[in-house]
Image (cartoon, coloured by chain):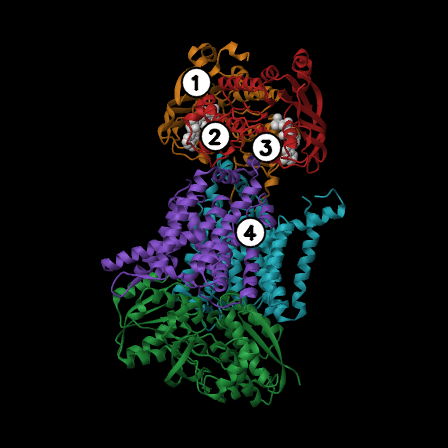
Amino acid sequence: MSNMLLEAKEVHTYYGASHILHGIDFNIREGEGIALMGRNGMGKSTLIKSMLGIVRPRHGRVLVRGDDYTKARTYQTAQQGIAYVPEGRGIFKSLTVRENLLMSARAGVDGRREWTFDRVMETFPRLGERINNGGWQLSGGEQQMLTIGRALMTNPDLLILDEATEGLAPLIAMEIWRIVKEIRRTGIATVIVDKNHGAVTSICDRAMILVKGQVVFDGTSDEIRAQPELIQKHLGV
Amino acid sequence: MSTTTKNEVLLQADRLTRRFGGLVANQDISVTLERQMIHVLLGPNGAGKSTCINMLSGDLPPSEGRIHYLGKDITALTAAQRSQVGIGRSYQRTNIFPQFTVLENVRLAAQSRRQQPWSLFTKAMEQKWALDKARACIEEAGLGKRVDWVSGVLSHGEQRQLEIAMVLSTDAQVLLLDEPLAGMGSEESASMVEVLKRLRQTRGILLVEHDMDAVFAVADMITVMVNGQLLECGPPAQIKASVAVQQAYLGTEDSFHV
Amino acid sequence: ADKVKVGLMLPYTGTYAALGTAITNGFKQFVDENGGKLGGREVEYFTVDDESNPAKATENAKKLVSRDKVDVLVGTVHSGVALAMAKVARDTKTLMIVPNAGANDLTGPLCSPYVFRSSFSAWQPSYAMGEALAKKGIKNVATVTWKYSFGEESVAGFKEAFEKGGGKLVKEMTLPFPNVEFQPFLTEIASAKPDAVFVFFAGAGAAKFVADYAAAGLKNSIPLYGPGFLTDGNLGAMGGAGEGLLTTLHYADGLTNAKDAAFRTKYAQTYKLQPDVYAVQGYDAAQMYEAGLKAAGGDPEKKEDVIKGMESAKIDSPRGAFTLSKAHNPVQDIYMRQVKGDQNVMLEVVSKSLEDPARGCKM
Amino acid sequence: MNANASLIPKLVALAIVACVPLSGESFYIEIVGKVLVMAIFAMSLDLLVGFTGLVSFGHAAYFGIAAYAVAILSPEYEAASLWYVLPASVGLSALAAFVIGLFVLRTKGIYFIMVTLAFAQMAYFIFHDTPLGGGSDGKYLNNKPSASIFGWEPFDLTNEVHMFYFILAVLVLVYLFLARVLQSPFGRVLVGIKSNEHRMQSLGYLTFRYKLGAFTLAGALGGLAGFLYAVLFGFVTPELLSWHESGNVLLMVILGGMGNLAGAIAGAFAFEAMREIFADITKYWQLLMGGVIVAVVLFLPGGLAGVPGRIKRALQGGEAK
Amino acid sequence: MDFASFLIQTLNSLQYGLLLFLVASGLTLVFGIMGIINLAHGSFYMIGAYLAFVLTSATGSLVLAVVLGIPLALAFGAFLEWALFSHLYKRDHLEQVLLTYGLILIFEQLRSLLVGDDVHGVAIPAFLDASIQLTEVMSYPVYRLAISVVCIVLAVALYYVIQRTRLGMMIRAGNDDRGMVEALGININMIYRVVFALGVALAALAGMLAAPISSVFPNMGSHVLIISFVIVVIGGIGSVWGALVAALIVGFADTFGKVLVPELSGIVVYVVMAVVLLWRPEGILKKG
Ligand SMILES: Nc1ncnc2c1ncn2[C@@H]1O[C@H](COP(=O)(O)OP(=O)(O)OP(=O)(O)O)[C@@H](O)[C@H]1O
Ligand SMILES: Nc1ncnc2c1ncn2[C@@H]1O[C@H](COP(=O)(O)OP(=O)(O)OP(=O)(O)O)[C@@H](O)[C@H]1O
Ligand SMILES: [Mg+2]
Ligand SMILES: [Mg+2]
């Protein structure tokens, strides 16, 4: 079986006094795909940020490829081949589209360079048309493409997409899903947060549901598809 | 609230054009918005939908074209003035007062309807009408449990809900909503669709949204843009069936099964 | 008896810090020579750093006067600060000795029985220079100075004497204080080609002006003159650019009086520094007060007597003896000096016992 | 929130300050009076910086204009009437702020900082380089304004104790006034503008007018402080308008903790006290003061206004951090 | 003004403008690109000048002083960033104002304790100590022209690093969103440390190069502080070309202002700044 890539053990995270994550266990293996689900405000983004060291868990541990990264700086974790597309985008406004992509370019952990500038351009032709525009001049969807492209430029082993299709036109969203599938096929692991449950469960092999900072479901995509009442109960659809 | 006449034309944009340097983000776009109608603006990313809304709301001046509200030419009015006459908007990218509580965010929005800059000695918190209005709108947007939270610490989806509560509390007759559902969970989206339907009873709504389930659940009229140009305009059924629209925007049914 | 309380309000930080220190040193040197006493009493010092900031001047002066209850205020370098101090001195009837600030007003329209000066008025060295240049037969002169009172008063003093002697100012240039970009003026001077240039600058600005003037090649074609502040304490910073410059001041190197020789030896020994005009002014401030106290039998409370004593004193200064005018400004010799190496060497007395006209003083 | 809990320390502080004249030491009366004046000045700036988000780096201009106005409007050999020079000089400052505001409020952020500086420097050079106010040497105000109303004299500003209480009363009034204003709808709009001006506009607020209102009000109150300063010391100099003074008052506001009126007062006290005390103990006072300031920034984020909260938390022994 | 002096005044303006750019260049980096409101910029300039004085006295050559001084300044800058500035990025920008004000006081006092309060000169290196004859009475010092050349080289180098290199992109990105840069696997703290140190070294270099012509004196830092901010701001924050253009504009305004409208020369610079910012509220060249 393939190796463990990223693990969270018994993670408790607080914002000031409010206790958000109540002892979460999470793990993802190389090449695996996980759909992280839950209503607004349940702690999905917080879990991701805790693992990346963007917020510090108060208890618990974070492991990357078996090594302790609990106290590592965010960039050290990220350099282990983890790319993050945050919700709400976070593109660099004062950089042009080209610069946004170039600044993050890096070979993968194993030295591979599959994702080049040209390949990103092929994948998102729309960005090619806006290549010299400043980041602040893009439409919402264009910004979204740019963040995904920027993450791919780091040639990651694990791609974390937090609401990556927010604001994308259906056609593009489908295109993203197609690309993610393709990425997965090349062996890159993915964690996806998205409200399109149908799409994510069909891409990912595992699904996890968070309710109020606790894991209420962790199983295969097939299992969750077989239990629509679970989705109904925890996600309200 | 003012009297409402069915199908009264609230907002009319004539041949709006907006250029950014060499790029034509909107070309000759005309939109009509009637009361008790939800008019949806669709289009691929970068088609110019937000630009169009920005022109209607006064955030961006059009390069060409005119805008009329209730028959009056409002092209020259600023964003604030348009808000005062009754055009409210929400933003695609969350745009709130992050240091304030949810209540204060919405209360400020409500207060904008009766500004009394000269009355330096009344307490804002004693203006009951604004508080009541704010609470009602927060409830309506589904944020009842978060009234006293500082809005900056809300989750992304909750901030999107707050955005809606704010525009609601301004009593705007015309609502320009730029992807209100983006970032909301499916449950919240569903309840927001109900809110939209309720709002439609008294106002006119221009909606930009990429959530097709929601769009087809509420749209009375759909305009599709591509590359700044008008592609098609018509009732939902017509749009759904249009081959051009499918190619440019919706995709075909089978491509849904990734 | 009680101690004599001396309030030193001088700049100890900032641009004029070195001047404040020199004045303090000079003052203390006299007191030491006098057995650590003034008027036969022990001396207690109170010091305040005035930062050369007029906005804090009143407050700082009051600190000495009303909190520390000093018998005499000694200060300061910056004219704006000194004017504010003088108001406090007048209002509170405190004796004040100005050991540097040259604003004409201090011993002019704003003169007061309580305010004395141990230094000079802006008018004095400049007027002497005006006379000297006119006598030399120079006809056309251009002037440059900072646009603030001291600079403008200096130029006015020069102009008064120079025009009286038949000269003419062909160009009067000013620049905002403390701007030191002189190049445009050098170009103007080169194109106007006057017979000579008269400038008022002090401190780092003076050093820079002299250096720039030489670097622009003007030094060889158009002679430069100014009050002694142009070169005093700045010769090191100018490199060789100052060599040969003629300036006027009430003090100089190479004076022949015995007092000066003793003063300089002692100063150099005590402070491991060469004394300058500021040290002399500090020293004389102490001498003046000593004269006043002596007249009052050592009692600083007898202000009338102290004042009378000071007014009638003949101060045996390292600069040469001087007396005080009715307006309390030194009536002193002004020297023509020339820069030789690191010294401002005395050439001659250009104006014997020059008295400031004290215009506007109603005393 | 818990207004009453923080009211007591404030009243105690006020009572202590009010006792200063009992010392009978005119130096302390005057120096504390000056600090009170600076506190008023700092509060007026805090209205802009801390509450409206307009970081003005030229606030000394309004202080100086009013200070010069009293000096210039007062006749040379007799006292002017307080009831004429006070409104006149404060009015002039307000007018200057209004006119300058019309221009500077078109810019934002750092650019705003620099344009306010530019206009203040122009005002500085007007007083420094023209004979209007006595040039670089400044001008005396020989007679303090008289408070007499048709012969009846409620108080006498030449009396240092009266002067002190007059300033203290003004301070309290300004504090209460601003506290009230900040709770008014107008004040809430200012705070909204600080948080997100663009959003305020799209909510229908003509933010320019509100900002102009705040700018003018702050200018007037800054002028009030300048007026008191001139009357207190009887001497005005162009340096009152210099960028150093604008910088100092800004430092007081930041030191105290922006967006907190009591903080602005505390900042003024701390800033002035540090200078006085350190300059008294050593010639190297700048080193001490600089060190303390650096330490405050490092260890007291949010300035002095955050200190009571820290103490409370420490006392409650709650979770660290 | 005759034509010859008009030409010379133009030369003066250019040369002064370039000198101003040199003085402001460190601030362009630290304030313009990194977004730190650094009031201590003038102090770093002053430290550079005093370094030049002390090292030139010790080694006998300004060139050696610069060679030794730059590494010192770099180390000093890196230390300050590590010890102080790195704690402030997440805080309100105005706290940087307070911090750097404190630093000004400390540096001035230390300077006074270590080197005293006297005015000093620094000798021009012998190979540059010459003049070019312009008119029969006036000549131009070669050293000034040499500095102008250094300024132009610096401007080009700065522009290249900031706009064209990945390092430059990372710095600019860091000013937009530090957290995001770090999440992309970039050690932004290290980058900021390096860039801050570079900014300090630039300011110090300006001080060292200017020392022979401006002389070395207490408070010299505060003289250049405001003008440096003026230049960075009217150029458009973050733009190297903008700063260069702004420096030249100020150079011209100041030079011709002094000659043509001497009564107003004090406010000319501020009038220029007000006019520029009212005309273009974000500076002459916003970006790039
Ligand atoms: N910076 C913060 N400070 C305090 N509380 C926060 C902060 N960020 C998030 N929270 C709170 O933590 C909880 C979890 O937030 P999180 O962003 O992880 O939710 P989420 O599951 O990603 O929701 P969404 O789908 O809306 O993005 C929410 O209740 C939110 O209000
Ligand atoms: N300020 C600007 N300067 C230059 N180009 C701009 C600017 N704002 C928008 N654009 C461009 O105009 C086009 C239309 O943008 P707009 O934001 O209106 O798209 P949209 O239809 O809302 O897209 P989305 O669904 O992705 O939000 C885009 O290509 C965008 O890059
Ligand atoms: Mg989230
Ligand atoms: Mg959009």
Spot occupied by residue C53 in the image (x, y as percentages of width and height): 51, 66
Spot occupied by residue A23 in the image (x, y as percentages of width and height): 73, 29
Q: How many marks?
A: 4
Task: Determine contact: label 2, label 1, CB under 8 Å.
Answer: no
Please tell me the colour of chain C: green
Kind of residue at badge 3: Gln
Residue assigned mark 3? A79
Residue assigned mark 2? B86
Q: Residue at x 42, y 70 (%)?
A: C202
Labels 1, 4: front one: 4
Kind of residue at badge 4: Ala
Instruction: Give the structural element (helix, strand or loop) at label 3.
Output: loop
Instruction: Please tell me which of labels 2 and 1 falls first in the chain.
Output: 2
Q: CA distance from mark 3 to mark 2?
A: 51 Å
| Residue C30 in the figure: left or right of residue A125 | right
Mark 2, chain letter?
A: B
Q: CA distance from mark 3 to mark 1?
A: 43 Å
The answer as to whether the residues below labels 3 and 2 share one chain is no
Residue D192, image quadrant: top right
Q: CA distance from mark 3 to mark 4?
A: 27 Å
Please tell me the colour of chain E: purple
Q: Residues within 10 Å of mark 3 (few under 14, many from 20)?
A: many
Kind of residue at badge 2: Gly
The answer as to whether the residues below labels 1 and 4 share one chain is no
Farthest residue to the left: give it.
E2
